[in-house]
Image: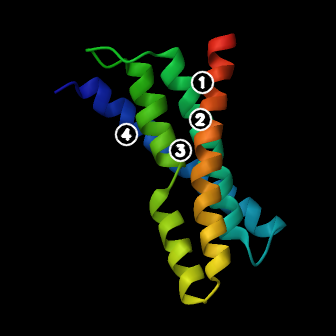
Amino acid sequence: MNWLGVLGVAIGGACGSVVRYGVGRLVGVCFPGVASLVSTGLVNLVGAFFLGVVVTRFQASPKPNAWALLLGVGFCGGLTTFSTLAMELADLMHAKRFWGMVGYGIGSMVFGILAFLLGVWVASRS
């Protein structure tokens, strides 16, 4: 096992989680009442974009790149949160806000893919 890679993933994940928490707190002040939806959407889009940059800059190879592990697996993994998205979708469903649930779910997937592709495009141009 590559302990340096494990350490990089742990450090990146911790940093990404702290940033996600900070964004959630800040968004909570700016958008009370919808803070969770806004902060989850924001960190997921930023994380998808950044992951597109990371995977383009550090192309996949048989030997994992330390920067890809730190930034892609660790930081982006800690920053983004599919489990919170799923919980928010369930909350919308339980609140009988079906169209909000569908829009938020589909929008998250579509805009997440577009953000990732934008990150790939930006990284490949520079």
Q: Mark 1 or 4 closer to N-term?
A: 4
- Residue 25 spot, x, y in % from top left: 69, 63
Looking at the rendered structure, the secondary structure element under dot 1 is: helix
| Residue holding disc 4 | 10
Q: Of the residues tagged 1 and 3, which is closer to the observer?
A: 1
Q: Is residue 20 left or right of residue 65?
A: right
CA gap between label 1 and label 4 equals 24 Å
- Residue 90 spot, x, y in % from top left: 50, 78
Q: Are marks 2 and 1 in contact (CB under 8 Å)?
A: yes
The part of the image, by quadrant, that contains residue 29 is: bottom right
| Residue holding disc 3 | 16
The residue depicted at 58 percent of the width and 64 percent of the height is 105
> Which residue type does callout 2 highlight?
Phe
The residue depicted at 56 percent of the width and 73 percent of the height is 88
| Residue holding disc 1 | 120
Q: Mark 4 or 3 closer to N-term?
A: 4
The part of the image, by quadrant, that contains residue 23 is: bottom right
Q: Are marks 1 and 3 in contact (CB under 8 Å)?
A: no
Q: Is residue 75 left or right of residue 121?
A: left
| Residue holding disc 2 | 116
